[in-house]
């Protein structure tokens, strides 16, 4: 049976992706302005990435972006998307996140992962073979610190001596925590083991949709083994999105940007081999379910398919991109907020039912009003205008 949240959450996963040649100062400012826009449109969440190389994903500290955005916004929750745990001493990261929990009055979220770019680990001298195990090790320590435990531990890469956080979390028992999941079992297994949420960041990649049901299955198995519980409402899927009033317009808006993103970054920079069977254009990407591009109605259908394929989830995050112009990108987010989100947040049905009730019963409802208006004219000794008389007879007054 498919799980459907009473109120699905929507947000953004901001790596970010900024093309080479742009002013980085202006690009980072634009990232903050985008979150302002989403906050005004009542989006629920925004997650900031952590990367240190390769020239496109410019945010080195998601905590700095959260602190800056928290001062500019009112409602939207702000998360690390994600903090690369092997790059940090777990005590220092836990302490910074609890401070953010206070500074945001409970709007901070903590997303974690092993580190997405091998080039980051290379510069830090970290063996990629150790990253996933270190992520699990660090997360266990951070959760213990969040809970107020005193931790003494010595590993090959960090030491703790009677360590404890001097601040209790603002959020009880602690802020939301989620583990990034791609195709490796490390993400869902770690999430299940620690009883926290999942950030499925590779849904848009070839084969990503097929792995969704397996992702949750692995997480549930790990949770059961560890004596933990997990909730599908804490499962977030990440997918590129772009909307316009017409499907053809939406495709045209992003066609060039999508191809450049695939070619210049993923192939030419990160070395992902080109797939002859998957040209990476808009049509083929949408056809295989690798992006939601089209009209609001297309987006509603796509979410229904994702719910069915996954078995249910609590939040859908748009993978931030700059495939279209700034103006069209902002308009896309507005179309989603106006016409898509209400369908999955319990905000459409009552309005539609109210309209239908009045339309179906307008003769009964408005008939007495028409008679009252007619009587008022008669009582005043005024001749009813012919057009008004015709409208009254049709029940339109």
Image (tube, rainbow, N blue to C red):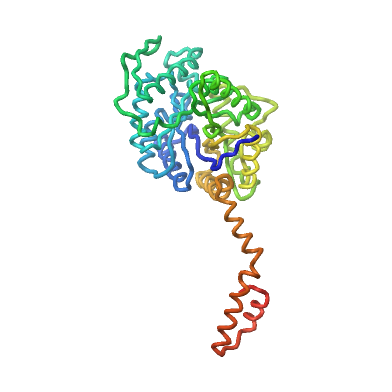
Residue at the limit of the structure toward the right, as seen here:
277
Q: Is residue 214 left or right of residue 34?
A: right
Q: Position of residue 183 (x, y in %)?
A: 59, 22
Residue at the limit of the structure toward the bottom, as seen here:
381
* Residue at image point 58% right, 79% down: 372
Q: Position of residue 142 (x, y in %)?
A: 40, 22
- Depth check, front residue: 345 or 203: 345
- Depth check, front residue: 51 or 362: 362
Q: Position of residue 39 (x, y in %)?
A: 44, 45
The picture quadrant where one finds residue 147 is top left
* Image quadrant containing the N terminus: top right
* Residue at image point 64% right, 70% down: 364
Q: Is residue 82 left or right of residue 267?
A: left
For residue 376, say whether it is visible: yes
Q: Position of residue 375 (x, y in %)?
A: 58, 83
* Residue at image point 34% right, 25% down: 95
For residue 306, say whether it is visible: no
Q: Is residue 296 left or right of residue 175?
A: right
* Image quadrant containing the C terminus: bottom right
């Amino acid at each position: 049976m498919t799980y459907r949240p009473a109120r699905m959450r929507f947000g953004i996963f901001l790596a970010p992706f900024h093309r080479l040649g742009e002013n980085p100062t202006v690009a980072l400012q634009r990232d903050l302005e985008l979150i302002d826009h989403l906050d005004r449109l009542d989006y629920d969440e925004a997650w900031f990435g952590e990367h240190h190389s390769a020239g496109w994903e410019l945010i080195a500290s998601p905590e700095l972006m959260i602190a800056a955005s928290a001062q500019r916004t009112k409602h939207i929750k702000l998360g690390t998307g994600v903090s690369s745990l092997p790059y940090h001493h777990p005590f220092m990261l836990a302490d910074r996140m609890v401070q953010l929990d206070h500074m945001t009055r409970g709007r901070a979220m903590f997303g974690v992962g092993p580190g997405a770019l091998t080039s980051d680990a290379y510069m830090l001298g970290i063996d990629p073979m150790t990253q996933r195990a270190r992520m699990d090790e660090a997360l266990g320590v951070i959760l213990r610190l969040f809970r107020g435990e005193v931790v003494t531990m010595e590993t090959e890469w960090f030491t703790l001596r009677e360590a404890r956080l001097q601040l209790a979390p603002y959020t009880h028992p602690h802020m939301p925590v989620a583990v990034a999941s791609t195709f490796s079992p490390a993400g869902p297994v770690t999430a299940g083991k620690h009883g926290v949420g999942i950030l499925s960041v590779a849904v848009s990649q070839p084969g990503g949709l097929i792995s969704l049901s397996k992702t949750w299955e692995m997480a549930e198995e790990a949770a059961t083994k560890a004596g933990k519980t997990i909730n599908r409402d804490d499962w977030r899927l990440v997918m590129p999105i772009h909307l316009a009033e017409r499907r053809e317009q939406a495709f045209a808006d992003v066609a060039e940007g999508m191809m450049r993103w695939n070619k210049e970054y993923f192939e030419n920079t990160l070395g992902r081999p080109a797939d002859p069977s998957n040209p990476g254009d808009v049509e083929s990407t949408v056809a295989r379910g690798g992006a939601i591009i089209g009209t609001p109605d297309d987006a509603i259908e796509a979410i229904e398919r994702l719910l069915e394929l996954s078995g249910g989830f609590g939040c859908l995050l748009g993978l931030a991109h700059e495939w279209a112009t700034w103006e069209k990108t902002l308009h896309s987010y507005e179309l989603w907020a106006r016409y898509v989100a209400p369908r999955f947040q319990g905000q459409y049905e009552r309005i539609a039912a109210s309209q239908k009730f009045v339309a179906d019963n307008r003769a009964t409802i408005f008939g007495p009003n028409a008679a009252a208006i007619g009587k008022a004219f008669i009582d005043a000794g005024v001749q009813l205008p012919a057009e008004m008389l015709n409208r009254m007879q049709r029940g339109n007054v």
